[in-house]
Each structure stands twice: as structure tokens, then as C-alpha cells.
Image (spheres, rainbow, N blue to C red):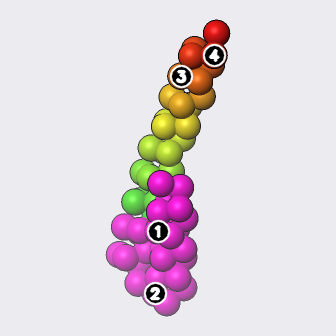
Amino acid sequence: MLQWALIFLIVAIIAGVFGFGGIAGASASIAQILFFIFLIALVVSVIMHLVRRT
């Protein structure tokens, strides 16, 4: 999932450089959403690992 967030971030940067504002904004928003979903999944995974370990 982090890989997809990075891909959308790169697409947003490239689109911004070439002047495609709408595509850049949409790609940046998608990258941000995917990044936060990744962070939530990471935190849940770490908590589950710690609970299972004890």
C-alpha cells in the first residue's frame, strides 16, 4: 500500500511540473489517503503483534 502511495505522489509531482493542476491535486489527495491508511494498518499491526506476544 505504501508503494501505491509513493506512485501517486510521483504522478502528482510530475503532473504538477507539467502544469496539470487537476491531475496533480487528485493524485496528491489519493497519495495522502493511501499513506494514512498505511499508517493506520501499521499501528494496528504493531498493537496486534504486541498483544499476541504477551
Q: Earlier in the sequence, mark 2 or mark 4?
A: 2
Whether residue 10 appears in magenta in the rendering, the answer is yes
Eye-nearest disc, 2 or 4: 4
Is residue 25 positioned above or below 36 on the image? below
Q: Residue furthest bottom?
A: 18
The type of residue carrying mark 4 is Arg
Q: Position of residue 38 (x, y in %)?
A: 50, 45
Which residue in the protein does label 3 denote? 48
Report the Cα–Cα distance between label 3 and label 1: 29 Å
Q: Earlier in the sequence, mark 1 or mark 4?
A: 1
User: Magenta residues, as a range?
Assistant: 1-27
The residue that appears at 64% across and 9% down in the rendered structure is 54
Q: Earlier in the sequence, mark 3 or mark 4?
A: 3
Report the Cα–Cα distance between label 1 and label 4: 35 Å
Q: Earlier in the sequence, mark 3 or mark 1?
A: 1
The type of residue carrying mark 2 is Gly
Q: Position of residue 46 (x, y in %)?
A: 60, 28
Report the Cα–Cα distance between label 2 and label 4: 51 Å
The type of residue carrying mark 3 is Met
Which residue in the protein does label 2 denote? 19
The residue that appears at 47% across and 54% down in the rendered structure is 1
Report the Cα–Cα distance between label 2 and label 1: 16 Å
- Whether tag 2 and tag 1 are in contact, CB under 8 A, the answer is no
Whether residue 25 appears in magenta in the rendering, the answer is yes
Res. 53 mark: 4
Residue in front for this viewpoint, 20 or 43: 43
| Quadrant in the rendering for residue 51 | top right
Eye-nearest disc, 3 or 1: 3
